[in-house]
Amino acid sequence: CLAAAVAANSSRGASAFSGSIRSGVSSTGGRTFSTLNSRSAFAASSRTASVVGASSLASFGNSGNSGSRIASAASRSSIDSIQLHMSSTEVSEDSTVSPRRVKTVNAQESDEPVSIKGWVRTVRKQKTLAFVEVNDGSSMSGIQCVLPFDAVDEETLKEIDNLTTGCSINAIGQIVKSQGGKQSVELSATSLRIVGTCPGETYPLAKKRHSLEYLRTIAHLRPRTNTIAAVSRVRSILAGQVHAFFQKEGFNYVQTPLITASDCEGAGEMFRVTTLDTDDVASLPRAKDEDGKELPGVDYGEDFFGKAAFLTVSGQLGGETYASALGDVYTFGPTFRAENSQTTRHLAEFWMVEPEMAFADLTSAMDNAEAMLKSVVGVALKECDEDLTFFGKFFDKGLKARLEKLVSKPFVRVAYRDAVKYLQEEIAKDPSKWQFPEVEFGTDLATEHERWLAETKFESAVFVYNYPKSIKAFYMRDNDEDGGETVNAMDLLVPGVGELVGGSQREERLDVLVDKMKDLDLDVEDYWWYLDLRRFGSVPHAGYGLGFERLVTYVCGIENIRDAIAFPRYPGNAEF
């Protein structure tokens, strides 16, 4: 910002800034001109509009290239725009001009020198030149830097001898059409500097394939591998499109608390949050009855929050409160579950996408979930083609076809009772092929059941709805047509994964909800605020939860959910 107005002075033909201007490159690659100093003056030529500056100029930016013109349009009280006309000879001798940084994913032929910054993947030296493959994380392929020995400076020649896999570098040159067949463009480099060395003898990621199990032991370095970097890029696109979809649909983004006193699922598998000194058991305050007699357990009334507190397993209950005022909302954040599971489908810390819609029923929730997934996966197919091609080659040969089918084909919808009937008929053919051959009404379907329905029976994403009340959460609305034997709930099953989404119409009737909570021994007083939503202007409403890491594994075609998140948390592991 300028601290004073700027006026033109064409009669004098020139003016000065009191100080010299240094130029640098901003994080976005644009030119940034910052603080003036008092050592010298920058004189504009008669062609440049004369500018009277304020006593100080903090900074202003120009996204143009080196030597771009700066012009000014001035009035008595304000400035519409300013451009500086600057050539290299007009900058004080201590000025430096850095080449524009280009991400490899955006690399195109250039007439001017640019900067490529990243990490070395491979180095090949020949008699007259060297080839350095550099990856900056923006794409799978990176870029090849060609360094002819007769076109680089002496310092670069020395640096080439010290290049190792994993070291970080800054290479400068022109991007030209590649003479090889593996890439369309390459960097014809004139300068290369090592930014950070990487001793080859101790670097854990030598140029060879490593198992995903091994990479989890060095989770701080595994993003440098093709697989985890590709997962990260796909995850980023998916997350961005989740927000884009809901924003376009008019949903408000709500951030619900991570610390709660409520068990949303009623399963009791929650991480406790406490500031009590658990290392000194004798000092823990004991619970007491009305007569002051000690009871088993700790008195959490003396804890930080004045009651027992936990990490949340879901943002749903908080989402419902805002849906009861804003109409349509969604949450997207971390959730936690202390389930002692070592399967490839479970994490202790995971992210959930949880929309809540007022004046909606189960059909509304299924319609929204289907539209959201088609939108998100469709964008991933378009934006992540290189990464998905990689996954299709090394992990799932039919990946792209499966994703394209999900986007283009309507999802199947089948009642739970019918799904059980189909499973019973199939299992009866050869029960020995099934790990869990006993399936009846009330069975909580296992992954093998879910995948058979999606992959074999329907060959499609499929909604299973109207589940037995006994295997679902307390907040799900009882179905009136069967006397409450089932609830208005659904799970979305997809090929390759099984359950991806779970949702329901919420129980909006106060008396019915209170009875269900008592049946599950939930303390009604802990949910007084949740019940108030049913006391004051209750409406039918519905929502669902999407396990985000499961979506990532589905879209990438990878098997283990521990590879779908940066630092996986599971029983026995909380490293990094």
Image (cartoon, rainbow, N blue to C red):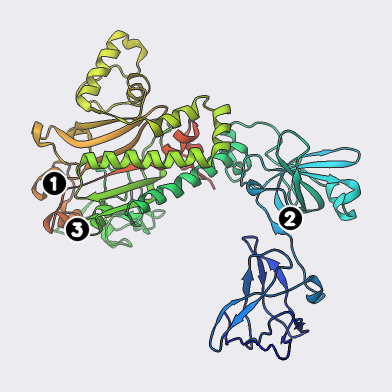
**Which residue bears the numbered disc 2?**
114
Q: Give the residue at the far bottom of this rendering.
A: 11
Q: Amino acid at mark 3?
A: Trp
Nearest the viewer among 13 and 231 is 13
**Which residue bears the numbered disc 1?**
513
Q: Quadrant of the N terminus?
A: bottom right
Residue 544 seen in the current view = yes
Check if mark 2's residue and mark 1's residue have beta carbons within 8 Å: no
Nearest the viewer among 121 and 412 is 412
What crowding class fits label 3: few (fewer than 14 Cα within 10 Å), some (14-19), or many (20 or more)? some
State whether residue 36 is above or below residue 484: below
Measured from the top left, where is residue 361 in percent x and y? Answer: 19, 43
| Mark nearer the N terminus (2 vs 3) | 2
**Which residue bears the numbered disc 3?**
529
Tell me the distance, in whole angstroms, between the alpha carbons under discs 2 and 3: 59 Å
Q: Amino acid at mark 2?
A: Val
Measured from the top left, where is residue 204 in percent x and y? Answer: 68, 39
Question: Dot 1 lies on which element?
Answer: helix
Q: Amino acid at mark 1?
A: Leu
Nearest the viewer among 177 and 342 is 177
In this rendering, position of residue 127 left or right of residue 87: right
Question: Dot 3 lies on which element?
Answer: helix
Residue 571 seen in the current view = no
Q: Tell me which residue sits at (21%, 21%) in the image.
A: 440
Tell me the distance, in whole angstroms, between the alpha carbons under discs 2 and 1: 64 Å
